[in-house]
Image (cartoon, rainbow, N blue to C red):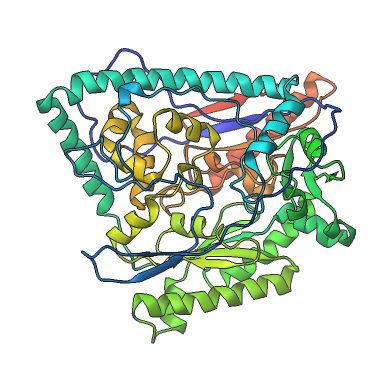
């Protein structure tokens, strides 16, 4: 159950282009997980595939100052590399001849397993997904996934219809297409004006936090596959369980089929809050304004700290060298205070720092040293859209239906996407493809209240919950006895949501009560 107080969105920076539109509109889909019923089929663990190297190199283009940039690549992305194209051409790609838009067809299959989370990259995705489908195909959980896949297909069909109209009425009319190009160019220029390389952001993320807290309390769990949550939904798992393909956001009954030895325990929110406070206190000794993104994540900027403690570091390289040592010290202190480990990403933007924090998990850190527009665009181009904070499996599936798989694809198709997508979705995708702003930008980021106090049963949260569209409270619970229990929970959620609005000095335009039934 969730109460939701929506805050009025900021006005768009530019007016929408006045172009012919098809009559059919299709809102962008949102993704939600539903708790399944239990099942009793057994299964053997899924074998892992060989490890993938964690480092690679990319060099800036000759047009910029030559510099070798070291980074950890995404472990799953399109094999072809898309190259940003000139403004007059949004159909070409550096990866070869792009399929005509009108020929795009997609039939999204039920997707029940994502191996992009740390500790899952070596798991065979196809075998694990096949097992999960076999185990759950007759359950209400799988039926719900089929329903969502069908809804995604309807939305893709509507967007492809817009694409056909775009080709005939926009691309086929040079005067109209030039107007659209100017609109996109203006938006790009606005986004580009916010690009800067003078900040050093650090994203720290506690490793398998809810499971790690339980393993600290009960050392016997350290050698066992452990899931935190319930038979209906797991909020996180330890790395032993992940070797079997058991991950957060997965129903517990499926986890038990993938790994019969799996131990499932409920989240100890009180213990997690204690460890979270210790973790954040250490980080805020470096940046008192560090922004909490949940109990187990925090974003800080090291500019002020470097200005006081590392005055001799003046170049980008020197400042990043100093930042890496500071982050190593910070992570060591976190471990001393909590007996838990944290991973970190260091980058010139918050979103890049968030992405980098996943590269060396667990208990590692990675820097993204990119100091020119060309270097950023080149770095981002081959990265799969699913790796972008804010893009979940639903958006990934819809973009795939449009022929979009990487950030380079988004930029190459920016004119078509501008026409067929909603303005807010388009701006987010273009910002992500350009490496400017994004969902972790300091002006956009906020924490869902459930992430702050751990109230959501899906404890680690979904990436799609981070935009400042609302504040709210939600609770997941087993069947209640009477109507009064429901009313009591609804009132408590409303009261907490109101408290957040007062604390953050926000006004609301509406109040929403959402009931989600067990499937």
Q: Please name the residue shown 48% across and 57% down the image.
A: 73
Where residue 383 appears, as percent x and y from the top left, is 44, 49
Q: Quadrant of residue 482?
A: top right
Query: In the rendered image, is residue 219 in sight?
Result: yes
516 is higher (above) or lower (below) than 305: above
Q: Quadrant of residue 31?
A: top right
505 is higher (above) or lower (below) than 332: above
Farthest residue, direction bottom: 312
211 is higher (above) or lower (below) than 496: below
Q: Please name the residue shown 62% across and 50% down the image.
A: 121
Which of the pair 318/247 is nearer the observer?
Answer: 247
165 is higher (above) or lower (below) than 317: above
Instruction: Decide if residue 360 is on the left or right side of residue 191.
Output: right
> Number of callouts in the render?
0
Where residue 375 appears, as percent x and y from the top left, is 32, 61
Instruction: Decide if residue 393 is on the left or right side of residue 84.
Output: right
Indicate the quadrant containing the N terminus: top left, top right, bottom left or bottom right: top right
Q: Please name the residue shown 49% across and 26% down the image.
A: 29
Farthest residue, direction top: 23
Query: In the rendered image, is residue 518 in sight?
Result: no
Instruction: Decide if residue 7 is on the left or right side of residue 48.
Output: left
Indicate the quadrant containing the C terminus: top left, top right, bottom left or bottom right: top right
Where residue 438 appears, as percent x and y from the top left, is 41, 48
């Amino acid at each position: 159950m969730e109460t939701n107080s929506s805050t009025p969105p900021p006005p768009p920076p530019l007016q929408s282009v006045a172009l012919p539109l098809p009559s059919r509109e299709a809102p962008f889909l949102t993704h939600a997980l539903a708790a399944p019923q239990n099942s009793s089929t057994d299964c053997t663990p899924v074998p892992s595939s060989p490890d993938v190297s964690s480092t690679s190199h990319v060099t800036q283009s000759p047009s910029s100052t030559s510099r070798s940039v070291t980074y950890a690549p995404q472990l799953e992305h399109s094999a072809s590399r898309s190259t940003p194209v000139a403004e007059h051409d949004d159909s070409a790609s550096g990866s070869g001849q792009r399929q005509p838009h009108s020929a795009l067809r997609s039939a999204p299959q039920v997707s029940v397993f994502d191996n992009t989370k740390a500790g899952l990259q070596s798991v065979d995705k196809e075998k694990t997904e096949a097992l999960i489908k076999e185990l759950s195909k007759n359950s209400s959980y799988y039926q719900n996934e089929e329903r969502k896949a069908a809804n995604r297909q309807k939305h893709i069909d509507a967007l492809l219809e817009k694409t056909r109209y775009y080709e005939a009425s926009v691309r086929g009319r040079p005067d109209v297409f030039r107007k659209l190009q100017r609109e996109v160019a203006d938006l790009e220029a606005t986004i580009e004006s916010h690009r800067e390389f003078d900040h050093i952001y650090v994203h720290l993320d506690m490793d398998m936090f809810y499971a790690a807290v339980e393993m600290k309390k009960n050392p016997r769990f350290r050698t066992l596959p452990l899931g935190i949550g319930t038979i209906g939904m797991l909020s996180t798992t330890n790395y032993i369980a992940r070797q079997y393909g058991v991950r957060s956001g997965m129903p517990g009954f499926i986890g038990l089929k993938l790994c019969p030895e799996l131990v499932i325990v409920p989240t100890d929110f009180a213990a997690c809050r204690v460890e979270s406070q210790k973790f954040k206190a250490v980080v805020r000794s470096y940046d008192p304004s560090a922004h909490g993104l949940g109990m187990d994540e925090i974003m800080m900027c090291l500019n002020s700290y470097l200005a006081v403690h590392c005055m001799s570091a003046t170049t980008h390289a020197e400042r990043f060298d100093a930042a890496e040592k500071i982050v190593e010290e910070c992570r060591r202190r976190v471990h001393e205070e909590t007996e838990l480990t944290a991973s970190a990403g260091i980058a010139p933007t918050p979103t890049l720092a968030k992405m980098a924090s996943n590269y060396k998990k667990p208990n590692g850190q990675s820097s993204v040293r990119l100091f020119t527009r060309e270097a950023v665009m080149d770095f981002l181009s081959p990265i799969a859209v699913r790796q972008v904070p804010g893009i979940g499996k639903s958006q990934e599936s819809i973009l795939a239906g449009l022929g979009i798989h990487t950030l380079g694809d988004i930029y190459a198709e920016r004119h078509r996407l501008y026409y067929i997508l909603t303005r807010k979705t388009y701006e987010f995708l273009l910002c992500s493809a350009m490496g400017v702003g994004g969902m972790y930008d300091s002006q956009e980021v906020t924490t869902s209240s459930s992430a702050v106090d751990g109230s959501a049963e899906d404890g680690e949260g979904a990436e799609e919950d981070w935009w400042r569209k609302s504040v709210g409270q939600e609770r997941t619970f087993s069947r209640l006895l009477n109507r009064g229990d429901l009313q009591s929970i609804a009132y408590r959620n409303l009261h907490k949501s109101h408290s957040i609005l007062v604390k953050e000095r926000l006004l609301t335009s509406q109040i929403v009560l959402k009931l989600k039934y067990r499937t």
